[in-house]
Structure formats: structure tokens, C-alpha cells
């Protein structure tokens, strides 16, 4: 396990602390990271979760409290894909933050207690959709979505990237994708096409008005 990092000048800019109690859920997890000065310590807490629709099927939540007291929470599914990220718009005292202890109390944003994103992954462990708090979405389409028989070497090729300013609902069909936004279908001229993967050096960004 990595305990510290020493630079050529003999300084130790990074130090790591682990949980060594075998009966603890955090066994062999990093519980604190020192970055820079001795007081510049970030604390990590790991909380098991019950997967379900309410938490985007997360099985683990990691709570991080940085040296300034900024608290963030990242939830992961059983394959350790990040599925929910939240930044709490308040600050905590230095030290570990749990679900009930040392919770952020000093708010620096009015009426916005939590700022966060949600993520969805496909069967190949590739990011499929990123949802923002304002219901906007970024959706990635891969060769496997367009061709189920795509070879393993090509199925992860990003064919298109689309961004909407509101929640996006879409399903893969044969033509080549049926994009629907709420009750309205995105015009054919605005839909990603299979050939964009080979005619564009980078995935195009579509800004579709709601």
C-alpha cells in the first residue's frame, strides 16, 4: 500500500492513512490523505448502501471532507462505477464526516443544499448518460448501440455525443436511433448518424433546444 510520496528535495507532499482493523467495513481503505502542509488533510468515510432506484442502484457511498471543510459524496454501483455525485453547499469542521456526525452546517449557498450529478453506464462499462440537477443531460452513443454485432475492438468507439437542456429519454432502434425528448421526437436531421464516427475526428456536440 502507498503510504507516502517523497519528492527529489526530500519533502513529503503526500501521506496516506488506512484503516487496518479487519472487522471494520473500511478495512484497507484510505481514510485520510495529507496533501502539502500537516493540516492539509482530507478525510474519507465509506458507507454501505442498499441498491435501489432512489440511489441509482448504489452499493457504496464515499464521503470526502477536504481541508477547507467542503464535503462531497460519491456513490458507486457494485462494479464501482460512479452513479451519483453530490457537493454539499455547506462546510463541516475538520475530520471525518458520516451520515449523522459532523454534517455540514455552515452554508455558503442560499436555498441550494445539494449540488450533484447522476451517471448511467452501459453493459460495456462505458458512460452512457450524465444527468445534471437542472434535468439537462449528456448522452454518449457507441458503435455497439448502432450495431449490436460490432466487434469488441470497435464497440467502445464513441459515435456521437449529444447534449440537451432538459431530461432526455431515448431508446436504440434500427433507424439508427429513435431519439425522443419528453413527448416530442427529435427531428431526423438532428439525430446522430452512424457515419459520424468515421467522418468526424471528434464526436459532434448537438445543442438541441427544449
Image: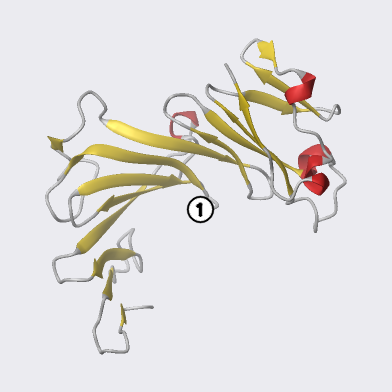
- Quadrant location of the N terminus in the rendered image: bottom left
Observer-nearest residue: 22 or 92? 92
Question: Would you say 118 lies left or right of 65 here?
Answer: right
Q: Position of residue 51 (x, y in %)?
A: 47, 38
Scheme of colours in the image: secondary structure
Q: Residue at x 27, y 89 (%)?
A: 9
Question: Would you say 132 lies left or right of 22 here?
Answer: right
Q: How many marks?
A: 1
Q: Is residue 128 above or below residue 17?
A: above
Q: Residue at x 20, y 26 (%)?
A: 110
Question: Would you say 79 lies left or right of 94 here?
Answer: right
Q: Position of residue 92 (x, y in %)?
A: 15, 45
Q: Residue at x 40, y 43 (%)?
A: 49
Displayed quadrant of residue 179: top right
Q: Is residue 122 above or below residue 37?
A: above
Q: Position of residue 37 (x, y in %)?
A: 17, 71
Q: Position of residue 210 (x, y in %)?
A: 57, 16
Q: Which residue is mark 1?
A: 80
Q: Residue at x 30, y 61 (%)?
A: 24
Question: Would you say 15 lies left or right of 176 here?
Answer: left
Displayed quadrant of residue 29: bottom left
Neighbour tally class for label 1: few under 14, some 14-19, many 20 plus, Cα within 10 Å: few
Q: Is residue 21 above or below residue 129?
A: below
> Helix, strand or loop at disc 1?
loop
Amino acid at each position: 500500500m502507498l503510504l507516502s510520496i517523497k519528492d527529489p528535495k526530500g519533502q513529503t507532499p503526500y501521506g496516506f492513512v488506512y484503516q487496518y482493523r479487519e472487522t471494520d467495513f473500511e478495512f484497507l481503505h484510505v481514510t485520510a490523505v495529507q496533501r502539502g502542509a500537516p493540516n492539509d488533510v482530507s478525510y474519507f468515510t465509506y458507507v454501505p448502501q442498499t441498491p435501489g432506484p432512489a440511489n441509482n442502484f448504489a452499493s457504496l457511498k464515499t464521503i470526502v471532507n477536504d481541508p477547507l471543510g467542503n464535503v462531497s459524496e460519491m456513490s458507486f454501483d457494485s462494479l464501482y462505477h460512479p452513479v451519483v455525485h453530490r457537493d454539499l453547499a455547506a462546510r463541516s469542521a475538520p475530520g471525518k464526516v458520516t451520515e449523522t456526525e459532523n454534517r455540514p452546517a455552515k452554508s455558503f449557498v442560499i436555498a441550494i443544499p445539494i449540488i450533484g450529478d447522476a451517471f448511467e453506464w452501459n453493459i460495456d462499462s462505458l458512460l452512457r448518460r450524465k444527468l445534471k440537477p437542472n434535468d439537462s443531460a449528456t448522452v454518449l452513443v457507441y458503435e455497439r448501440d448502432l450495431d449490436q454485432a460490432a466487434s469488441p475492438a470497435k464497440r467502445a468507439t464513441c459515435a456521437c455525443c449529444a447534449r440537451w437542456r432538459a431530461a432526455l429519454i431515448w431508446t436504440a432502434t434500427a433507424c439508427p436511433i429513435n431519439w425522443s425528448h419528453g413527448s416530442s421526437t427529435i427531428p431526423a436531421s438532428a439525430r446522430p448518424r452512424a457515419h459520424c464516427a468515421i467522418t468526424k475526428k471528434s464526436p459532434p456536440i448537438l445543442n438541441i433546444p427544449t
